Amino acid sequence: MYDGRYGLPADIVAISRDWYNDSNGADGRLRDEHSQCGNFPDSFNPPLTTTNIFSILSLRRKLVAQDSTIEWTDATWNPVTGCTKVSAGCKFCYAERMAKRLQAMGKPQYAAGFQLTLQPHALKLPYKWVKPRFIFVNSMSDLFHRDVPLDYIRQVFKVMNDCAQHQFQVLTKRPERVAECADSLEWTPNIWMGTSVEDERVVGRIDHLRSVPAQVRFLSIEPLIGPLPTLLLDGIDWVIVGGESGPGARPMAEDWVIAIQEMCMESGVPFFFKQWGGQNKKKTGRLLLGRTWDEMPVQLTY
């Protein structure tokens, strides 16, 4: 049953209302944190909005579990490490920098540095996580790199198929290979598929993503290094935007971000603003238009 006021399932609206109004325990902290963010009024008068529901569910997720410092996920899982550069967004790759540090620290899984390496010992990890969580798959690589065998991709998907308690967020810069392999993989509803789009030159990746039978298809527009005037969001369920951070970070213009946020609002697509980035991302923060934007795909976040 849908609640016609919000165009969302009535049970999700009810759950959101209960979480927000509950003054005890974790739900009380949820209300306090959300009030500090200034995202919406202290009560449901005026009525709750769809955007508010997206934000409530996202904050609830953060209170339940947070093992990763990446704002839009709970944990990372790397059955593959290492990668190669394919486009301008890879120029100052954070994973490459991190892999070199871990290699210098003597971490055995990074003995080869940032060379692409299968990590079969990591396949069992999600089975050990009993509490449901959002899991970013291959934060240190790309599962759909050409050098990852299809049989190994199937093994990774088998783990995701088995662990229905989790939501797996798979992100790639190679959606054309995802499209090629899609019919050979089992797309259970807990597998989200996304692609990175850093500027207009790679906007064509979105067409490949649209052909993939994932229940949630999302865009990671990070690092955003140029405007996206031809961006279309049909067939897309979630958009993350963020600026580049670290040494050599390229600037991101506010109007580029606002244009995407407005498009998401017009299209009813949840919008997540991750960071402004720069040399010191903590200093530049996460506020856009005076608030944080932590929206998530609502159908799978409760």
Image (cartoon, rainbow, N blue to C red):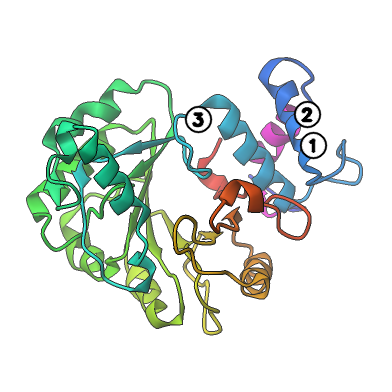
Q: Secondary structure at mark 2?
A: helix
Any part of residue 9 in sight: no
Which residue does the numbered mark 2 point to in the structure image?
32
205 vs 74, left or right, is: left
* Residue depicted at 18% across the width and 40% down the height: 110
Q: Which amino acid type is shown beneath numbered disc 2?
A: Asp
Q: CA distance from mark 2 to mark 1?
A: 6 Å
Q: Quadrant of the C terminus?
A: top right
40 vs 158, left or right, is: right
Q: Position of residue 81 (x, y in %)?
A: 21, 46
Q: Secondary structure at mark 1?
A: helix
Q: Which amino acid type is shown beneath numbered disc 1?
A: Gln
Q: CA distance from mark 2 to mark 3?
A: 18 Å
Task: Determine contact: label 2, label 1, CB under 8 Å.
Answer: yes
**Residue 8 covered by magenta stretch:** yes
Magenta stretch in the rendered image? 7-20
Which residue does the numbered mark 3 point to in the structure image?
66
Image mark for residue 36: 1
Q: Position of residue 75 (x, y in %)?
A: 40, 34
Query: In the current view of this chain or complex, which residue is farthest to the right?
Result: 45
Q: CA distance from mark 3 to mark 1?
A: 19 Å
Q: Position of residue 179 (x, y in %)?
A: 24, 67
